[in-house]
Amino acid sequence: MRTAEQDGGRNLREIAAELRVAAELFEVRPEDEALGRIPRAETEDRTPQVLREIAGHLESGNWWSSEDVPLGTAELLLRFPRFSQILPIYWGQDGVAISDDMQDSTVEDGIRLFIEETHPRCPWQLPSVVSECSQALALFHTEEQLDAFFCEAMGGGSGSEDFLDFFPLLARHCVDHLKEAHSPLWTPSR
């Protein structure tokens, strides 16, 4: 709401005023067609009171900004859609890249296996993997944080490497493969 206000949209006082008008309408004409899309409280008779409470809360300015609230696990998982698929499947417990067949292989062999299984869809999948590698290193600053999130919360892994070493290695192999095996998806017209 604050972003909309800064970009020229309705400000918080205007939204609060609209909520108060809706609360009044719910009291006077609860069947009014204009109220059809406005959510109601659990019990309909509480709706005006709840709308006024929300309006008061907006006007008070006594609420946290997104910078004050740490992201939850579910929100962070949404930042890593590719990792939530590939880390558990390839490098999680009993993952393909660390299975009995791969027990004598290196982490790089596991990365190559992942890239081979992605081929030929690499240009559409690997760039987002590279991006998620960078995001992970930007958001989590220690191996302990990386391990807690990607192993415990996500159920993934990084083979025998620390995540601080694994993510740059994975990103580099993805980029190298794209450069070697795929032409650019876009070239400037002349």
Image (tube, rainbow, N blue to C red):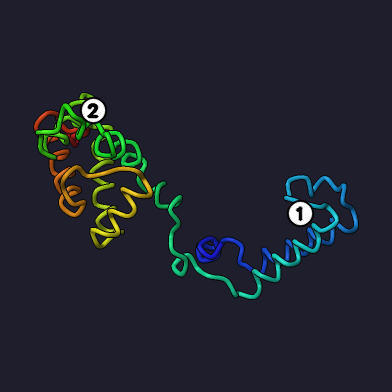
- In the rendered image, residue 54, in percent from the top left (x then y), is placed at 69, 65
Quarter residue 139 falls in: bottom left
Kind of residue at badge 1: Ala
SS at badge 1: loop
| The C terminus - image quarter | top left
Please state the horizontal and vertical placement of residue 29, each as a whole percent of the image: 89, 53
In-image side of 163 versus 26 (left or right) = left
Q: Position of residue 65 (x, y in %)?
A: 50, 68
Mark 2 or mark 1, which has the lower sequence index? 1
Quadrant assignment, res 1:
bottom right
Name the residue located 38 percent from the left edge and 49 percent from the top edge: 153
- For label 1, the residue is 41
- Residue, x 35% and y 45% (percent of image)? 80
**Residue 57 badge:** none
Left or right: where 28 falls relative to 102: right
Task: Please indicate whether residue 190 sits to the left or right of residue 153 in the image.
Answer: left
Q: Secondary structure at mark 2?
A: helix
Between 11 and 102, which is closer to the camera in this rendering? 102
The spot of residue 61 in percent (x, y) is 60, 74
Provide the residue designation for mark 2: 118
Q: Residue furthest top?
A: 120
